Image: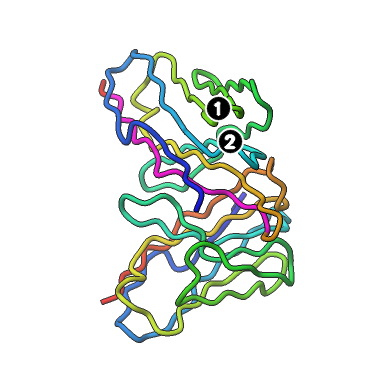
Amino acid sequence: NAGVTQTPKFQVLKTGQSMTLQCAQDMNHNSMYWYRQDPGMGLRLIYYSASEGTTDKGEVPNGYNVSRLNKREFSLRLESAAPSQTSVYFCASSENRNSNQPQHFGDGTRLSIL
Amino acid sequence: ILNVEQSPQSLHVQEGDSTNFTCSFPSSNFYALHWYRWETAKSPEALFVMTLNGDEKKKGRISATLNTKEGYSYLYIKGSQPEDSATYLCASYIDRGSTLGRLYFGRGTQLTVWP
């Protein structure tokens, strides 16, 4: 049971480079999320997709774009990476956006911007 | 801005000790309170989802209570074991109506259990 799969697991970029973080889930979940985790901070929501075909901004969307490619896949793109985007990124999914649905997390992508 | 607060930030206990920590959240517009367990080098895993005032949930040696009127939840671990060492996250689900509801996470309580 793969659950939520994120690629890559590690990446080093130079300032100004672009890249896409990939996320796929095999649980037939409707809702998907991208978070970032920084030292001393809680998980902060970047973007989410309540259902296929919809995306919405979270708490810290600046500098990011997302695509809900299909029901399984939700990608996060950094168009012009900045050192402030150095972080650990987590993708998560839930059956739907109802409050009683737990979120299932991937293993994270550790991203360093030089 | 909604604040979900967790205390203490970190906790060190001996094997066999029982321990508890607190999650505080805004009591207005409450829908649900989630607890997650996050082991080092792994991803967060859901422990409990609680929705009703007075809810009590239990999973093995771990249990949680919920008070929505005063805006707090306690997580208890009975007879802590080294494998309980992890960061415990709580998150409150808030739906503001004008935007889609979502979870707001606390910063976590890092528990270390010494053998």
Residue at 63% in and 68% down? A56
Of residues B14 and A80, the one nearer the viewer is A80
Considering the whole magenta stretch, tell me its main secondary structure.
strand
The residue at 59%/32% (across/down) is B48
Quadrant of image for the C terminus of chain B: top left
Q: Nearer the viewer, residue A102 or B103?
A: B103
Give the amino acid at mark 2: Ser
Q: Position of residue A17 (x, y in %)?
A: 37, 85
Quarter of the figure with residue B30:
top right
Q: Is residue A41 above or below residue B11?
A: below
Where residue A20 sits in the image (x, y, percent)? 49, 77
Dot 2 or dot 1: first in sequence order is 2
Q: Label 1 near label 2: C-beta < 8 Å?
A: yes
Crowding near the residue tagged with mark 2, few <14, some 14–19, many ≥20 C-alpha atoms within 10 Å: some
Q: Amino acid at mark 1?
A: Glu
Q: Residues within 10 Å of mark 1 (few under 14, many from 20)?
A: few
The CA distance from mark 2 to mark 1 is 6 Å
Q: Which residue is mark 2?
A: B27
Mark 2 element type: loop
Say whether mark 1 and mark 2 are on the same chain: yes
Residue B106 placement: quadrant? top left
Which subunit holds the residue at mark 1?
Answer: B
Q: Which residues are magenta?
A: B100-113
Q: Chain of mark 2?
A: B
- x, y (%) of residue A25? 63, 59
- Is B81 situated above or below A29? above
Residue B9 lies in magenta, yes or no? no
Question: What residue sits 40% from the left and 84% below the top?
Answer: A80
Q: Is residue A79 above or below residue B68?
A: below
Secondary-structure class at tag 1: loop
Query: Which circle marks residue B70 in the picture?
Result: 1
User: Where residue A100 sits in the image (x, y, percent)?
Assistant: 69, 40
